[in-house]
Image: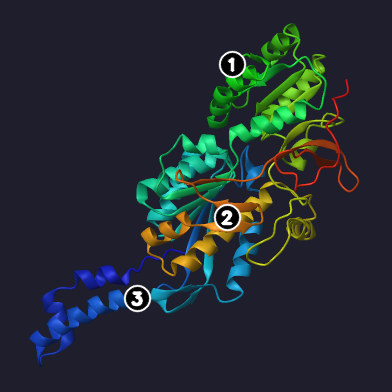
Amino acid sequence: MSKKEGSMSEKKTISRREFMKKAGTVGAAVALTGGLSAVAKTAQAQKPEFILIGHPNPSTGPIASFGEASPWADELAIEEINKQGGIFIKEAGKKLPLKLKLVDTASDPTKAADVASKLILNDKIDIMVALHTPDTVNPVTSMCERYQVPCVSLDAPVDAWLTGGPYKWSFHAFWTVDDIITVFTGLWDQVKTNKAVGAAWPNDPDGKVWSELFTPKLKAMGYKVVDVGRFPYGMQDYSAFINTWKKEKVEIITGVLIPPDWATLWRQCHQQGFIPKVATIGKAILFPSAVEALGGNLPNGLTSEIWWSPSHPFKSSLSGKTSKDLCDAWTAKTKKEWTQPIGFKYAAFEIVADSLKRAQTLDKAKVREAIAATNLNTIVGPVKYNEKNFSRTPLVGGQWVKGKKWPWEIVITYNKEYPNIPTAGKTAPLQK
């Protein structure tokens, strides 16, 4: 799908003698001057035939569940944009369809940076979309800053994204760790505890930022924080954590783990007889597949943040679809339960389309300006970027319970900051 034109290099290297032969003997000197001018005009006259969107996606690896909704959501949004012929681009003199180049990062930050650079340098993308946790978003936006390519990113906590800033070419929409702390403590306040919190912060961008922000703020709110330290992906023995939490009489545990690591930790908690009253975990239990993989009754009562759901009262700026409509379309197509990132995958292309419609050009600097001026109601809520290039999206909290349609379903139990997003009851303590 490369936009490179091989013929241009041939035209640039043509010798004077070769050109004279091709131009003919009559008026050769005139033909040379006019011919070279025609070549230049031809190069200038070449017009784009489509708009190319790059999307590095963790299709495989430990965070593949975050990328599962792509390319389905991407292609749905692009289909809705292209249904009317695409987006009008002034220098092309017509509407241009969007095309997608999605490349697997294998959940590896280094590979994410590599594929992003290739999308920019080899495929000559017009705009980048970056999603799926800081492990993908940070390296991809870094490449966009280096090569001055406009980038729309979502689906990674703002604070972790900001560690790669300041940004000029990248624009981000999601929630902050402050929002997470508010939601997590709001969930905990619904259960009577001794306010002793055991922390499980991995040695990754999320773990580093969350540990630095959670600990002082929780202490200021009257919580005792028991933090055993950072740990690598794939750790197999959490006995040191569990023994310390037992000793310190921890009744709440929290963290921001990838799904396989949380599964190992939670199973060992049960094997070693440690069941807190509340377990509120970021990232690891967002997905029905990851929750079901815990096995048995282990998911029952776990709590987490909820970025987006069928209950969110927002609509697509492209089609008017509601959040529930989008979830139902996903289930109809895949026969799977909805997942939280679906809305954010789709919303990325809402922002892209809106920005390009206003820019009416593929000039990267002007596209960047159009993204900066975004003020759009999307399927995940309003998006309007501030002076640091980010926009906060709504966040509520909820609890996994045995489902009616699916084995496990997450229900909203905390919505104080966004009462327009309905709840389905209060948080219940974990059962021993």
The correct choice, above or below, for 380 with respect to 267 in the image is: below
Residue 103: horizontal and vertical position, in percent? Answer: 53, 52
Q: Nearer the viewer, residue 242 or 373?
A: 373
Residue 176: horizontal and vertical position, in percent? Answer: 58, 37
Q: Quadrant of residue 241?
A: top right
What residue do we see at 26% from left, 68% from top?
Answer: 9
Q: Which residue is mark 1?
A: 229
The answer to whether any part of residue 330 appears in the image is: yes
| Dot 2 or dot 1, earlier in sequence | 1
Which amino acid is tagged 2?
A: Ala
Pair 3/2: label in front: 2
Residue 8: horizontal and vertical position, in percent? Answer: 28, 70
Residue positioned most to the bottom: 26
What residue do we see at 14% from left, 89% from top?
Answer: 24
The answer to whether any part of residue 123 appears in the image is: no
The correct choice, above or below, for 195 with respect to 427 in the image is: above
Residue positioned most to the top: 247
Q: Quadrant of residue 227?
A: top right
| Dot 3 or dot 1, earlier in sequence | 3
SS assignment at label 2: helix
Q: Nearer the viewer, residue 60 or 70?
A: 70
Circle 2: is it few (<14), some (14-19), or many (20+) Cα within 10 Å? Answer: many
Which amino acid is tagged 1?
A: Gly
Q: Nearer the viewer, residue 14 or 204?
A: 204
Along the horizontal axis of the image, is 168 left or right of 355? left
Name the quadrant of the C terminus. Answer: top right
Q: Which residue is mark 3?
A: 46
The correct choice, above or below, for 276 with respect to 406 in the image is: above
Q: Which residue is mark 2?
A: 348
